[in-house]
Amino acid sequence: MNLNEREARDRLARARIARLATSGADGRPHIVPFTFAAVDDRILHAVDHKPKRTTDLRRLRNIRENPSVSVLVDHYDDLDWELLWWVRADGDARVIEDEAGRAEPVRLLREKYSQYRERAPEGPVIEIRVTRWTGWAYR
Amino acid sequence: MNLNEREARDRLARARIARLATSGADGRPHIVPFTFAAVDDRILHAVDHKPKRTTDLRRLRNIRENPSVSVLVDHYDDLDWELLWWVRADGDARVIEDEAGRAEPVRLLREKYSQYRERAPEGPVIEIRVTRWTGWAYR
């Protein structure tokens, strides 16, 4: 069954890990697992370390070339496929590097993950504005 | 630390679920969770049900428009980030619809998943030829 938008948004926000698909000017899709904080229709991520150049990381380069992204959270259960569900958030991303813009996302990430309270992420922030929520659950 | 190609291939093959990123002619990335069987440098998936047209499913339409795909398997542990790892397989995909071509992939999927032994997938097969293995583990 399809999940409604609110249910999809809630399930994604509660997840601890998601996957981010980007696609650069070359049209080749690229996928990475990523930690995130979600607020309403925004999904926020921060790169752990400062890359030497912001073009160094493929996810950042792709977003600069093509802001369209797709984010997925899914639940798998090998014994009972009736427990399967997934949520996809499609939208547009941008890279935030200035300290003023990084402050709120980094604060939210530190609230969500104890690991970031021990050591805050130092790299650029990716902010995704979700334009479409899609979700499915077996039951 | 980076995983070598053999380790990356082995970890992906043992996983029960992966994520597939495709990107169509419009350049928008798309991401879905998917079951698969992996043999050497091939990753095989079958759609559960026959779509009315093979252009109906976004993953199939995208692959027909642009064969480049990216597949991800990852392991997350909320309590201990030292257990984190991921494997990415980049390559080219094609859609197989004829029964002769579907036979081996469906057989391998039924060997791997008991659910498919109860009810075989009926839809088109996606065959991915991996051209690049990438993997990382915290330790």
Image: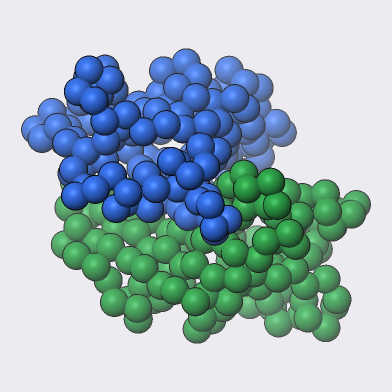
Chain colours: A blue, B green
Residue A46 location, x and y as percent? 28, 35
Say if A82 sits above or below A124 in the image: below
Numbered-mark total: 0
Residue A25 location, x and y as percent? 53, 52
Indicate the quadrant where residue B1 lies.
bottom left
Q: Nearer the viewer, residue B127 or A22?
A: A22
Quadrant location of the N terminus of chain A in the rendered image: top right
Indicate the quadrant where residue B10 lies.
bottom left
Residue B126 location, x and y as percent? 69, 67
Tell me if A59 is positioned left or right of B94 in this view. Answer: left
Q: Residue at x 78, y 81 (%)?
A: B101
- Residue at far left of view: A118
Q: Residue at x 62, y 21 (%)?
A: A5
Residue B88 location, x and y as percent? 42, 63
Say if B69 sits above or below B14 in the image: above
Q: Residue at x 62, y 27 (%)?
A: A132
- Is residue B41 visible in this depiction of the protein? yes
Quadrant location of the C terminus of chain A in the rendered image: top right
